[in-house]
Image (cartoon, rainbow, N blue to C red):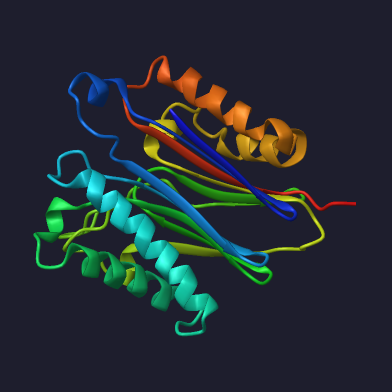
Amino acid sequence: MISKEERRDNLIFVTVSDIGSNHRILCMPNQDAIGFNYIGEDFVIVVSDGVGSCKEADIGSKYVVDAVKQLFSSIKSRTLQFDNYEIADAIISYWRISIGNNPIDDYCATVKAALKVGNTVKIISLGDGIAAISSNGISLIAPTEETNFTNETKCMSSFVSPASFWIGDFHLDTYEPFAVLCCTDGVANGLVLGKEVELLNEIERNTNSEVLKEELENLIKEIGDYSFDDKTVGVVKYERKN
């Protein structure tokens, strides 16, 4: 299990990732990837699950994380607009640039991310897993139901287009606490269906930032008792200091 915690003024970032038992037995790498970045009070956090049937799934997920972090830098430097279509198009473009001339469909991966600029958080979703935010009794969670289209897969692939993404806007009162949760399906499948928002609300309202990392590690351990998948979760929690 690999855990990371970082504090930035009123924000705490915690990430936890653990390789699934199947991959450990087969001496395969963790195909999940996770990352975050912040500039001032703005931030991005992203998780990605490499599609297991793809040859370079573990690298594809890392390329997704790199692409979303590059997107954040481009928005903050004002070389890219904070617009849903441009966001999705840029993620695809940056991901494909990393792949170069290699076969795109060897690198398929999901996208679950949250991107905060000013008072707006964009929840970005493609494929399985959870991407959600909660603040002061109001929540936004990316839909999990699958819709099948001809020649479209629910992941980054040669068929992906900006229309494949779900992106929702959440407007913050920056004086109120909030929490963001992004995780791969190895975690999402270990949660009781419909309880995702309850978990997020618990993190927002009742989990002290001092024990957040420990609580997330315990969650991954509990899920690991009956889930063979790679498991990765990232949380951003905002607690305004007095």
Asked if residue 210 is positioned above or below residue 6 in the image, the reply reads above
Q: In the drawing, does residue 148 fall left or right of residue 198?
A: left
| x and y percentages locating residue 33 in the rendered image | 36, 45
Q: Nearer the viewer, residue 105 or 150?
A: 105
| x and y percentages locating residue 114 in the rendered image | 52, 58
| x and y percentages locating residue 88 in the rendered image | 37, 70
| x and y percentages locating residue 188 in the rendered image | 44, 35
Total numbered labels: 0
Residue 231 visible, this orientation: yes
Question: To which quarter of the image does residue 163 belong?
Answer: bottom left
Q: In the drawing, does residue 3 fall left or right of residue 208?
A: left
Question: To which quarter of the image does residue 27 belong?
Answer: top left
Q: From this viewpoint, which residue is outermost toward the right? A: 242
Q: Residue at image x 57%, y 32%?
A: 195
Asked if residue 214 is positioned above or below residue 106 in the image, the reply reads above
Q: Residue at image x 45%, y 22%?
A: 223
Question: To which quarter of the image does residue 19 belong?
Answer: top left
Q: Nearer the viewer, residue 4 or 20?
A: 4
Q: Residue at image x 54%, y 27%?
A: 217
Q: Residue at image x 28%, y 39%?
A: 31
Q: From this viewpoint, which residue is outermost toward the top? A: 225
Residue 83 visible, this orientation: no
Q: In the drawing, does residue 37 fall left or right of residue 184?
A: right
Asked if residue 59 is positioned above or below residue 211 in the image, the reply reads below
Q: Nearer the viewer, residue 90 or 79?
A: 79
**In what quadrant of the picture does the N terminus appear?**
top left
